[in-house]
Structure formats: C-alpha cells, structure tokens
Amino acid sequence: MTAMYNFQDAPLGFYDSVQDTFGREITFNDYLNATAPRYLQGQEKRSLPCITVGGVFNRRKLGGLIKPSGIVQVDIDAKDNGHVTDWERVKQAAAMVDGLELMVAISASGSGVFGLYFDPLLLLAFEQRGADAYLVEQKKLADCLTDEVEQLTGCVADRSVVNRPNGLRFVTADKNPVVFIEEMEMAVPCLVEYFEPTSKSVLSSCKSIN
C-alpha cells in the first residue's frame, strides 16, 4: 500500500464523540466539509464529532498508526492568551506559514485557533522507513511549526499537541476557515500588520526529512 496522496485525500480517523474509540476512516476533504451547528464549550463540546489529525489509529492509540495523514496540528488556546481580543486576526496570521497547504480555523469553543498543515515529506518518511519514523518526523515538524505560528501570531501555543498526533480535534462551527490547497487556489489575504515575525521562516531549517 502506498502512503503517497494529496492533502484533500489524506486519511483521518473520525469519531462521533470523545466516547467513540473505534471510529472510521474519512478524508481531509470530508472533515473540511463538516461543520458544527454552533460553538460549544465544556461537556457539550465533547459530544461533537472529532478526528485524529495525524492519521488513522487503531483505538486512537499512538502505537496503533494504520495510515498516516501527513498533517501536523498547531493549537492556540484562549486560556493561555488572555491578551487576544480578535481571534479572526489570529486565524489570518496563523495562515501565513510559507510552503505548506493548510487549514486554519476558530476552535470549536469559539475562542482559540487551530491550524492543520500538510507536508507530503512526512508521507515519504512513512513510505520509506515506517510508522516509527513518521511519528518522529511528525513531532519534529509540529515543534517547528509551533515556533513559526507563535512568531506569526504573537500567541502562546499548546505544546502538548506536539506529542499527540493521535489527539482529538473537534469539528468547528467556523464557516470561514482559511484554506490553502494548491489545486483549489483558496489562499486568503492575511493581515500583515498584525504581527512582526523575527525571521522569515523557521521551517527552512527544520523541514528536511532524512
């Protein structure tokens, strides 16, 4: 089985809620077309459908990777960023990462932002060296992307996400996510004045997968 595919066809584990541990496989495009009826918090949010971003995992266990997605997540929580008054502006800034197809949206609670970034080199790591190598490279890229997004947005990201490609990401009610998929040409103009990055990109020094 080849693990090489594009962003829209990337396989994800889909679960009806956090209580569902079996789930089923969908594509990223399926997730992109799914929206929650409204923003929800607390226990209500936990009833929403959700995905495992890093791919399809047996019973959501990190050691049970079945199919890799090539997608890395960055998560910015409201509780760690009390200075933010406009999450739409943060969303636009987090979409300024160069060189990767992406989706950035307001979190399921209505506060906070998450970004999903696709790198086909991760799939190559899986294809050539297996699941363990994929997870190592996925973590490296997640760490680098987290640095990049923190610089772009001026926010603090949740570092625990770096170690959890099998962690859950809820469907959101955001009807206007920023999406860039090369074939679709859906890049959205961003608010350059919102941030002052200290360097053009940290990815240039850490995206190489050996």
Image (cartoon, rainbow, N blue to C red):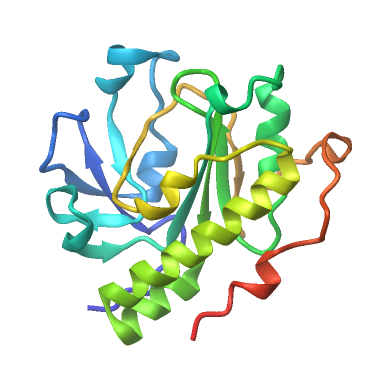
Q: Position of residue 89 (x, y in %)?
A: 73, 29
Position of residue 119 relative to residue 128, above or below, is above
Q: Quadrant of residue 31?
A: top left
Left or right for 70, reference 198: left
Q: Name the residue rendered at 12%, 39% in the picture.
A: 21
Q: Quadrant of residue 41?
A: top left
Tell me if residue 160 can be seen: yes
Q: Position of residue 184 (x, y in %)?
A: 60, 52
Q: Name the residue rendered at 67%, 64% in the picture.
A: 99
Image quarter where the N terminus lies is bottom left
Position of residue 110 relative to residue 65, above or below, is above
Q: Position of residue 126 (x, y in %)?
A: 33, 77
Q: Name the residue rendered at 35%, 53% in the picture.
A: 165
For the residue pair 37 and 195, the one nearer the viewer reads as: 195
Q: Name the residue rendered at 52%, 24% in the picture.
A: 174
Left or right for 95, reference 130: right
